[in-house]
Amino acid sequence: MINLGMASLRLCAGLVGRRSGFCARSLRTITGMTVSQIDEEVAKLLELKTQLGGDEGRHQFTLKTAKGTRDYNPKQMAIREKVFNTIISCFKRHGAENIDTPVFELKETLTGKYGEDSKYDLTVSFKPTVLDPTPSQVPFARYLAMNKVTNIKRYHIAKVYRRDNPAMTRGRYREFYQCDFDIAGQYDPMIPDAECLKIVHEILSELELGDFRIKVNDRRILDGMFAVCGVPDDKFRTICSTVDKLDKMSWEDVRSEMVKEKGLSEEAADQIGQYVSLQGGMDLAERLLQDAKMSQSKQACAGLTDMKQLFSYLQLFQVTDKVVFDLSLARGLDYYTGVIYEAILTQTGPVPVAATQNGAGEKAEEGVSVGSVAGGGRYDGLVGMFDPKGRKVPCVGVSIGIERVFSIMEQKAEASAEKVRTTETQVMVASAQKNLLEERLRLTAELWNAGIKAEVMYKKNPKLLSQLQHCEDSGIPLVAIIGEQELKDGVVKLRTVHSREEIDVSRAELVEEIKRRTSDV
Amino acid sequence: MINLGMASLRLCAGLVGRRSGFCARSLRTITGMTVSQIDEEVAKLLELKTQLGGDEGRHQFTLKTAKGTRDYNPKQMAIREKVFNTIISCFKRHGAENIDTPVFELKETLTGKYGEDSKYDLTVSFKPTVLDPTPSQVPFARYLAMNKVTNIKRYHIAKVYRRDNPAMTRGRYREFYQCDFDIAGQYDPMIPDAECLKIVHEILSELELGDFRIKVNDRRILDGMFAVCGVPDDKFRTICSTVDKLDKMSWEDVRSEMVKEKGLSEEAADQIGQYVSLQGGMDLAERLLQDAKMSQSKQACAGLTDMKQLFSYLQLFQVTDKVVFDLSLARGLDYYTGVIYEAILTQTGPVPVAATQNGAGEKAEEGVSVGSVAGGGRYDGLVGMFDPKGRKVPCVGVSIGIERVFSIMEQKAEASAEKVRTTETQVMVASAQKNLLEERLRLTAELWNAGIKAEVMYKKNPKLLSQLQHCEDSGIPLVAIIGEQELKDGVVKLRTVHSREEIDVSRAELVEEIKRRTSDV
């Protein structure tokens, strides 16, 4: 069954790559079909393909991974593990639970076609980027509604998959990790929201990715601003998506797009221009609450009052050094209902470029700064959409752009002189003499049984030099050397690899001595 | 792109479920097509399906996960994490590196259609069970050949997927974890093989799943045995698969299948019967080396000599209490070339039943004991199959039946009075008085910044009782209570939840006191 499972995934991969070859003629010949008839046809075609044995032409095959996928070697995995550990430690420090939802969801879940309220079409409102937290929020909302969970603080880190995409050359992969943290529940305003920002601050600080900034805005402030600037209701979304491009386009270009492409009046555009250039903190929220135009919008006032509250909590959390209230931040997801935020790396230079090349620069072509490493916001309506009775569960969350983080960490490791260890081995059990394999194995087992991370060469008579070389290569700090004399004396020669210092340690004290010398590992 | 990715996986899931509805008529109408034409047609049909908006008939939708998938709640995830930690710690103790390969591989990789040597067809030789290590060995072998890795000790734990299957009601899932450990490289005989068995012994002991046994045999001994018993060469595989059923069928039934269904002579069957009833250790290997018939087979002698060697290493590793040389063990994979093994839980009772119900009893219907929790063996030919020049890299490895382990652990947790904690929170920051939200947040941030796992209620004025109740419910051991008086005195009232004992701790010493009191967490 497993091979078929792989085959089905592989077929999928093959199919999605051919979307661009879609031909109108053939579509016409089959448009009289129902969906279930289509499904049947598809099943038959796939079956036939299997029978034909796949692609024609048995050309010489080059070993490779499937398109859009890649292997991770031990060094890359060690870096990933370190990143995971940092992030998960932070989530756990904040009392988060871990849940897991399947990698695929029913179409009804993804399209949000439930009950009366079908105003959301999630397949449309998804922005095509991994940094938006959306995709993982949908299964999460489905989970909450289905299991009638009304409050939870959880994280979820998992591989996800996407269809083929046009930016493969720029390093977009079909298989990648998503990392999400969300707080669901009916609470007093802005407390969980502030904790999400605190978490982003902690994670980005601990990962040492360089200086960063967390931009904050509020959907209600954006909507209120559009309203008071004279943007027609039906243009809110499209104007919002143009504003979202301000981090990589000049105001002139953004203005031009709003006016020429989207038909906004010049006056409205210029009024928007005055607001979206504003950045600040609690002071800016206070000022806008007094602003003659803004204060006309109830929505904007609600958002601004909450923004003040948010900043007061952020002050308590001591994270205002990195957080900026920025009216140009306009994340593109329909279902955000309150605070939105996005963290960007402000350090220029090779890092963002590498991140893009290595596959995490997802948002570059879609309008968000290449330095974006986390984002999220409040989405109070999503769970209610899935609940049969429309019961709402307010949610706020954040996604960490973990693939980009990996890329940056990999690049830092490349640039650094420090070697990345791919094992945690504390000691190598070695011998300079022949015929001591059994003694080496016996000692190794003793160490394993005592919880010591130990390696031994799988050779009857390895050279001492090659045993020491392996320690050098893989960063093993200690060598436990035995010979006839040591065995007779009941000792082990414990060698420190970097200093080449050797001391005799009694067999009984060996475990404790190794633990003592590697306690910082 | 992500929504499309999900959609494509979902579509796959939908498609594979419809295989049975395959219709010969329509196949006929399209058999003139090439594979690429089929691909185009499939793409068009899928596109059309998307345009039609999915399944007809907007019947009331019930919230559910896709067929064959499930959610994992925090309690299940906590159990999984514990299992992962135990297993990964063991792998790391043995110096293993971590690698990751994509969840899908090119068809050429799965079918093994490389170069001249196409004698393997992996899609056929895969046994449909997660407990066989095969599926993950194929990407591993491809990885080694592609990256020209000639030696590595690695583990790989990942979710994998399979197509629909007939045993869904018995709890077979489409999405599940695989867990593999392998040692690749040219080494002296049986040393890495012995380490694999040592690892199985360590993991099963530490997981405390109950008593277990590790059966060991060797492909060469099986083949030699079949030869000296008079089984025709072309019947080795099929007779082997019948022998493999001995752990759930009586010898009479196995004999009958060999003779009546597979056309083996009664004499050959009876001779096999004498051998496959044998179990022992090094002594049995020695005895069979002297056996008049067995000793005629060079293959069998090579296997038996290695078996003796293996047991000598197992003695050094002190694991012979659980390991049995069992001539009836016949794992069904074509590419095993030497030692094979399988670990079974010997404890009877509710555990294996529950394991089957909960989705890990994969092998029940395919001929391996329901108690099977690990298996593997030596496969020296697989990498060479992928290498353009046929360079061989000997490999030996083991798969842990991690889904079954999860099921057993979940059931044990259910049966136990001990509560499974789903967070690691050390302290709850609480107050009995009103208007202290800001002080609670300030203290919580202090604790987070000091690395303490802390929670605080997201309410302006929560009741002390509900704060304490949350600690009881989620197993938080300590409460840091502040009130006006404590703030004035510069102290915190530290309450131990289980004993209800309270002491005043100075704010400066709070972090150390919390660490001291939760150092066993």
Image: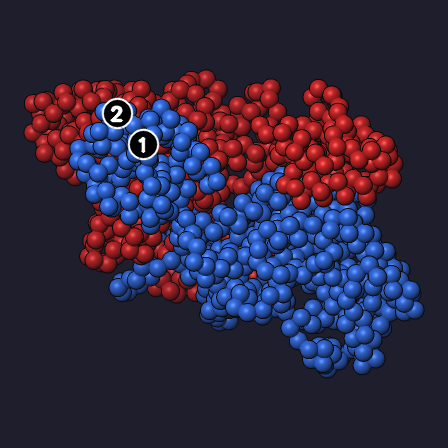
Chain colours: A red, B blue
Secondary element type, mark 1: strand
Front position in the image: B74 or A292 = B74
| Chain letter behind tag 2 | B
| Chain letter behind tag 1 | B
Q: Earlier in the sequence, mark 1 or mark 2?
A: 2
Residue A183 in sight here: yes
Looking at the picture, does residue A332 appear above or below residue B68? above
Where residue A201 appears, x then y in whole percent? 36, 27
Instruction: Name the quadrant containing residue B98.
Output: top right
Looking at the picture, does residue A5 appear above or below residue A169? below
Q: Are marks 1 and 2 in contact (CB under 8 Å)?
A: yes
Front position in the image: B245 or A119 = B245
Looking at the picture, does residue B346 appear above or below residue A157? below
Residue denoted by label 1: B504
Where residue B463 appears, x then y in whole percent? 21, 43
Where residue B38 appears, x then y in whole percent? 50, 56
Looking at the picture, does residue A104 appear above or below residue A201? below
Residue denoted by label 2: B489
Which amino acid type corresponds to the residue marked 2 in the rendered image? Asp
Which amino acid type corresponds to the residue marked 1 in the rendered image? Asp
Seen at 49% across and 27% down, the residue is A408
* Residue A513 placement, left or right of A254: right
Instruction: Name the quadrant containing residue A513.
Output: top right
Q: Locate the N terminus of chain B and report the quarter of the image it occupies.
A: top left
Instruction: Name the quadrant containing residue A445.
Output: top right
Seen at 86% across and 65% down, the residue is B288
